[in-house]
Image (tube, grey):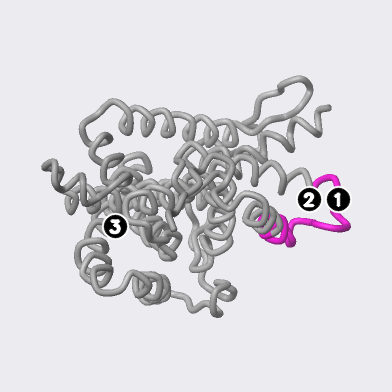
Amino acid sequence: MELFLQRLVDGLSEGSIYALIALGLVIIYRGTGHLNFAQGEMALFATYVVYQFGEWGIPIGIAVILGMAVGFVLGAVTEVAIVRPIGKKSPFAVFIVTIGLFQFLNWLDGAIWGGQSLPNTGAGSKQLSFPSLFPNAPTDFVTIFGANIKIQSLGVIALVAALTAALFAIFNHTRLGLAMRAVAANGESANLVGIRTGRVLMISWGLAAAIGALGGVVFAGINSTVSLGLMFTVFIYASAAATLGGFDSPGGAVIGGLIIGVIQNMAAGYAPEWVGQQMKVAVAFLVMLGVLLVRPSGLFGTSRVERV
């Protein structure tokens, strides 16, 4: 029982990080219909910025807020300067551009903070020490039903729960949230009733990048390091989470992330000879494949009906 509870909490903690990145994917997809393949690298760039602020002596709490602000600006500028003009000419081209942005940001991180990675892995890149947002010393744990649960894990889960509640309030009880929902439902109609769709889309991309930045900071804190390959596998897990929950459901993205994290941890813990820590990505891939075959819209996504 103790081991099960410990693996459950660890899985929820890992899944919370996937949920943060998946939330960014969903927010962008709801508003524009595009998949931002650079979401993970935007988060990584902001994480490196937080590291740099720490090197300048800025406390971690303030550095995280500043890093999220940098992420917001990066996302907003990307939408205005790159995605918007290209998307008007060819929606498919946005797919290619975000992949190119993925490569560019990874190169830029290496050029500024040092280290060269192997393609798509980060192997061999320079690892820089990164502080944790929560207490993570060996003695920082609480005992629940005989299981030693890390305070860091509980902190990550609580952070994602608070952020999810805040986003729910924004989407359902503010003018900005109403505008974002209107643009997601029908951008042309929203524009006709006076909603400035361009501004809403810019804010959506900025908000997604800011949330991703928080996910990158939390994950770097858990690993105690930041490197060029930090967010690559996390992005795969987050994509699986968004697919599982539904690309048009923020709540589904959170639940999907938690499910992926728990399934991975349980599979690696109870079947190490088959899964192990190095094969967790295969679990995410199988979950994503199964969902696409059975319910392409995801568990909480909206099925699209096309008239013919």
Residue at the location (17% across, 50% down)?
199
> Does label 1 or label 3 sit earlier along the sequence?
3
Residue at disc 2, secondary structure: helix
Residue located 81% across and 34% down the image: 3
User: Magenta span has 97?
Assistant: no
Q: Please give the name of the residue rendered at 53% of the width and 62% of the height, measured from the top-left corner.
A: 230
Q: Quadrant of residue 81?
A: bottom left
Query: Is disc 3 surrounded by few (<14), some (14 to 19) or many (20+) residues within 10 Å?
Result: many
Q: Earlier in the sequence, mark 3 or mark 2?
A: 3
In the rendered structure, the answer to whether residue 265 lies left or right of residue 66 reads right
Q: Quadrant of the N terminus?
A: top right
Q: Name the residue at 38% across, 47% down.
A: 27
Tell me where the magenta segment starts and ends, as one range.
269-285
Q: Nearer the viewer, residue 94 or 237?
A: 94
Question: Does the magenta segment cover residue 272?
Answer: yes
On residue 75, the disc is 3
Considering depth in this image, is 6 or 286 the residue closer to the camera? 286
Q: Is residue 16 left or right of residue 59?
A: right
Assign a secondary structure to mark 1: loop
In this rendering, the answer to whether 156 lies above or below 52 is above
Name the disc covering residue 271, or none: 1
Determine contact: label 1, label 2, CB under 8 Å.
Answer: yes
Mark 2 nearby-residue class (10 Å; few <14, some 14–19, many ≥20): many
Three-letter residue code for mark 3: Gly
Is residue 128 among the parts visible in the rendering?
A: yes
Provide the residue designation for mark 2.
268
Does dot 3 land on a helix, a strand or a loop?
helix
Type of amino acid at the residue the image marks with label 1: Ala
